[in-house]
Image (cartoon, grey):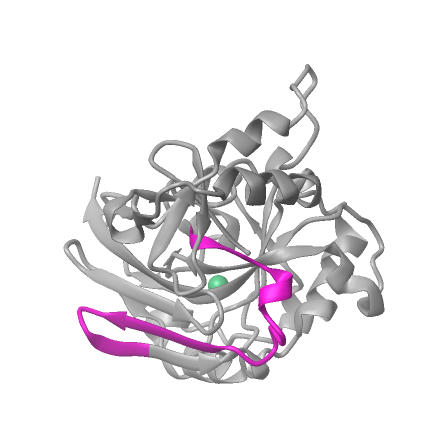
Amino acid sequence: MRICRFNRDRLGLVSADGEYLIDVSEALEQLPSLNWPLVHGDPLFAHLAELVPAIISVAEGKPRIPINSVRLESPVATPSKIIAAPVNYQKHLDEANADAGINFGVEQKTIADYGLFLKAASALVGPADGVVLPPLDRRIDHELELAVIIGKPGRHIEQANAFDHVAGYAIGLDMTIRGLEDRSWRKSFESFAVLGPWIATKDEIADPGALDMLLTLDGEVRQRANTRDLVWNIPKLIEYASATYTLYPGDIILTGTPEGVAPVSPGDIMVCSIGGIGAMKVAVRVA
Ligand code: MN
């Protein structure tokens, strides 16, 4: 199943070819009402398994809407956190160490040295929102990444059980200011976490460790890779992250970027695709 958020918080069931959606927002009425204090996480992903029958029955007989006629928003609305993996592809580590524009003269070490980092949850946007560059005279790069969305909460999750906690997958962009400040600052500007175009539930993806990834910018190939080259694979990332924090429904794990990171400019259009998920177009503008 492919599920999107569109046109100001409507819920969409997306066709297998990614060309159409059906508005299944009525299914959201099945979500329990919220009371203070709110629990961590995104209620849609906390209750997705229970909602699936309602999504299917609501969709029956409803019109198909062309995807390119709607405004695609982040399929996760309120994650408790966005967890991200630094230098999780060897060739990206190599390019960082070969390019002072990326590393600012500081030798980059490995993910085992750095561990994971967090991006502000408020940085999250969808493809239609686009990336808004802050008014800073700094290099700002795209980082295409496979995003893992947590379904079942958990702490101290073992690698063997890691996929029990996954709801699905999406395409992520970990937008980044290059420099020496802490990653959590450089990567947390508003709109610096793009998620879309929808969630492909985990049953749709036979092997998330073998997905082709492609980012083109104004038609030119910038990043082309495959998730088989992840240094820490998804079970390892979930084990490590959940040893640190409780993972809540809707939490997003950005699994790391492959080689080919490069600066963006106002007016650029990034087209990002990941095999088995789909593709999304993301525009870059200034504030
Ligand atoms: Mn990254």
Q: Is residue 122 left or right of residue 18?
A: right
Q: Is residue 273 shown above or below 117?
A: below
Q: In this view, does 258 lie to the left or right of 42?
A: left
Magenta-span inclusion, residue 122? no
Q: Which residue is drawn at 68% across and 33% down?
A: 40
Residue 154, percent from left and from top: 80, 48
Q: Residue furthest left?
A: 267
In the foreground, 267 or 185: 267
Q: Residue at x 64, y 43 (%)?
A: 53
Q: State the image quarter where residue 36 is shown.
A: top right
In the foreground, 19 or 243: 19
Which region shows up in magenta?
Answer: 195-222
Q: Which residue is drawn at 67% across and 43% down?
A: 249
In the foreground, 203 or 93: 203
Q: Where does the N terminus fall, quadrant-wise?
A: bottom right
Residue 130, percent from left and from top: 29, 48
In the foreground, 201 or 100: 201
- Is residue 249 visible to the viewer in this orientation of the structure? yes
Q: Is residue 113 shown above or below 74?
A: below
Q: Is residue 217 shown above or below 176?
A: below
Q: Where does the C terminus fall, quadrant-wise?
A: top left
- Is residue 104 visible to the viewer in this orientation of the structure? no
Q: State the image quarter where residue 161 is shown.
A: bottom right
Q: In this view, does 161 lie to the left or right of 146?
A: right
Residue 224, percent from left and from top: 38, 81
Magenta-span inclusion, residue 210? yes
